[in-house]
Image (spheres, grey):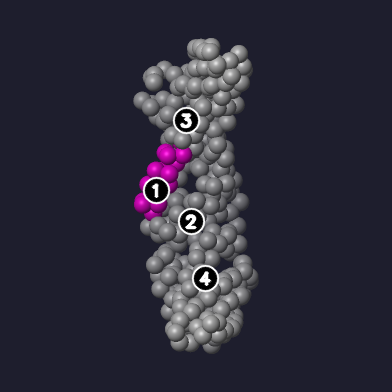
Amino acid sequence: KSDQYLYGIGIAKKGEHEEAKTQARRDLASQIQVSIDSARVERMLRDVNMATNKKTVETISRKIDDKIQTKVAITDLPGIEQSERVDGKKNTYILVRMDRAAWARSIRLQVVDLDGKIQSAYDTVQKHMASGLNELQQAMRIYTELMPLFSKRSMYEDRYRLAAPASTLPAPPIDPVMIRTKLSTLLLSITISLPQDQAAKPLLPGITEACANRGLQVLDNPTGAMLRMEFSVKEVKRLIDGAIRIDGRVNGSIKDAKGRVLGALEADATGGGGTEGSARMEMFKELSGQIVDALEDQLFTYLTRL
């Protein structure tokens, strides 16, 4: 361990110096990857805990974060050099090192370039913001455009903390916490209307409860709701070895207030029990959970299509 260098160790058959050096470089990159992945998880948990609508923001943040390439490539690590080599009876051992200061300088240059892109993207979004968008739609537009850049910046920040633990990068030109907090607060204003179909009634209590647990408001009256659920429910009763089994399926869609389809909604579930009533209750409970899970998973997509 060293304040000046990060090290990697490679082992190959005796005399295969280049292979040992390659393995050492990979070992160095792997160690850095583990440290950065750990920092990334801590950062995501911190961001979610700061959010008002934690579950929904966590889902959206992960969708954006997962699009960012965070894998540490050897080509991203400047100035790796061989430090020591030992040729044993059977194996060759090579120790490589990378100068922390050189890596930190490289990261700072990349961050300066990225900050320019963040400011430019923000100015462009503000300039071309479509008229007629409500506050949530505006926040979604800004979030969608800027958060991938902020996620990439967070990746650089994680690397910089490893390269230069005693130093910090300058703050970004636009505050990502402000953007995330505003969106998480506005997500509390999302209203969802449930289907009025008679066959769907047994699903409604479970859906209402699951939505409430995720900070989504359910309206009895579809008029004025931001999102509208519409689906049909089919069920098939079977008798298997004397036990009752009911298979249920939901097919439908999510629409906006004007009736425009934003996406599909599907779920399948099976309920079993000693009586037809208990089997049906189990099936509907499982369907309700799946429907809300699907809604939450695709909520980011639905909102970007509003």
Query: Which amino acid lies under the numbered mark 2 shown in the image of this protein?
Result: Thr
The image shows residue 247, relative to residue 164, as above or below, that is: below
At x 51%, y 74%, the residue is: 287
| Between 255 and 16, the one nearer to me in the picture | 16
Q: CA distance from mark 4 to mark 3?
A: 41 Å
Q: Is residue 207 left or right of residue 259?
A: left
- Pick the quarter of the image with the C terminus: bottom right
How busy is the neighbourhood of tag 3: few (under 14 within 10 Å), some, or many (20 plus)?
some
Single out the mark in the foreground, 2 or 3: 3
Mark nearer the N terminus (4 vs 3): 3
Residue at the spot x=60%, y=57% of the render? 130
Helix, strand or loop under label 4: helix
* N-term mark: 1 or 3: 3
The rendered magenta stretch, by its main secondary structure, is classed as helix
Please name the amino acid that badge 1 sits on.
Leu
State which mark lies toward you, 1 or 3: 3
Give me the disc on residue 291: 4
The magenta region covers 36-51
Check disc 3 and report the residue beneath it. Answer: 31
Residue at figure coordinates x 53%, y 22% from the top left: 10
- Residue 197 shows in this picture: no
Q: Residues within 10 Å of mark 4 (few under 14, many from 20)?
A: many
Q: Is residue 42 visible?
A: yes
Alpha carbon distance from label 2 to label 1: 12 Å
- The residue wearing badge 2 is 59
Q: Residues within 10 Å of mark 2 (few under 14, many from 20)?
A: some
Q: Nearer the viewer, mark 4 or mark 3?
A: 3
User: Identity of the amino acid at label 3?
Assistant: Gln
